[in-house]
Each structure stands twice: as C-alpha cells, then as structure tokens.
Image (cartoon, rainbow, N blue to C red):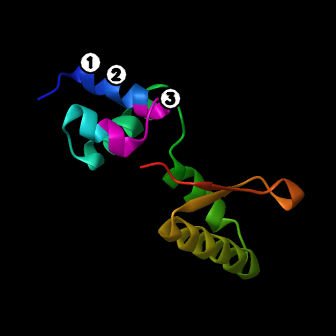
Amino acid sequence: MYSKEEKRAIGKEAYDKVDTLANLARKYSVPYQSVLNWRAAYAKSIGEVSLKSASSKRYEEMNEAELRAELLKRDIENARLKKGYVVKGGGKKKVYDTIPD
C-alpha cells in the first residue's frame, strides 16, 4: 500500500512521461489503472484540465459534419494503435513511430 505522497510521486512520474504507464505499473507492482488514476489525480492537483471535460465541451459545440470527421480521426487512430504504431506530425513531415512496451 502506497502513501498519499508516494502515489503523488508515481503520478508525477507518469505525468512527466518518465516511463510508459505499463512499465511504471510493473516497476511499482500495481495495476495499470492505478497508475492511470494517480496520473490524473496529479494532473488535477496542478490545475491541468482533464481530457474528458475539455473534449465534452468541445463536442457540444460541433455540428454533425465536424463530429463525423472527428469520429473518423478517432477510428483511424484506434486502428493504428491496435497495429502498434502512432503517427507524429503531418504532411511531408509525417513519422510513423512504434509504441514502446
């Protein structure tokens, strides 16, 4: 069992992207979801807006065509993640990068 300070430190490591969430979970012998929760708690403690609250407000302001375009982007991103890579940049500067374990 980790103290509040230790959870905050692990959350800070995850937030600062010192290592992947999966590696941090293994390193501290905790479930992946715990590291995810501690990172979110750390972000909230420093005043970072959560993705859920920021995106839900933005979605409400979109029309149907914009929502469909956003959904298509998410579907493409999910397909790439399932195949194990992410795309960084765009246009001629697009780079395909594998996802670290």
What residue lies at 38% left-to-right and 42% top-to-bottom?
21
Q: Is mark 3 on a helix, strand or loop?
A: loop
Say which quarter of the image contains residue 61. bottom right
Mark 2 is surrounded, within 10 Å at the Cα level, by few (under 14), some (14 to 19) or many (20 or more) other residues, namely: some
- Location of mark 3 (residue): 16
Q: Is 18 a magenta residue?
A: yes
Question: Earlier along the polypeptide chain: callout 3 or callout 1?
Answer: 1
> Whole-percent x and y of residue 25?
28, 40
Label 3: how many Cα within 10 Å (few below 14, some 14–19, many 20+)? few
Kind of residue indicated by mark 3: Asp
Per the image, the residue denoted by label 2 is: 9
Q: Is residue 24 left or right of residue 89?
A: left
> Would you say the residues marked 1 and 2 are in contact, meaning their CB atoms lie under 8 Å apart?
yes
Q: Give the range drawn in magenta.
A: 14-24
Name the foreground residue: 32 vs 65: 32
User: The residue under label 1 is which amino acid type?
Assistant: Glu
Q: How far apart are marks 1 and 2 (CA)?
A: 6 Å
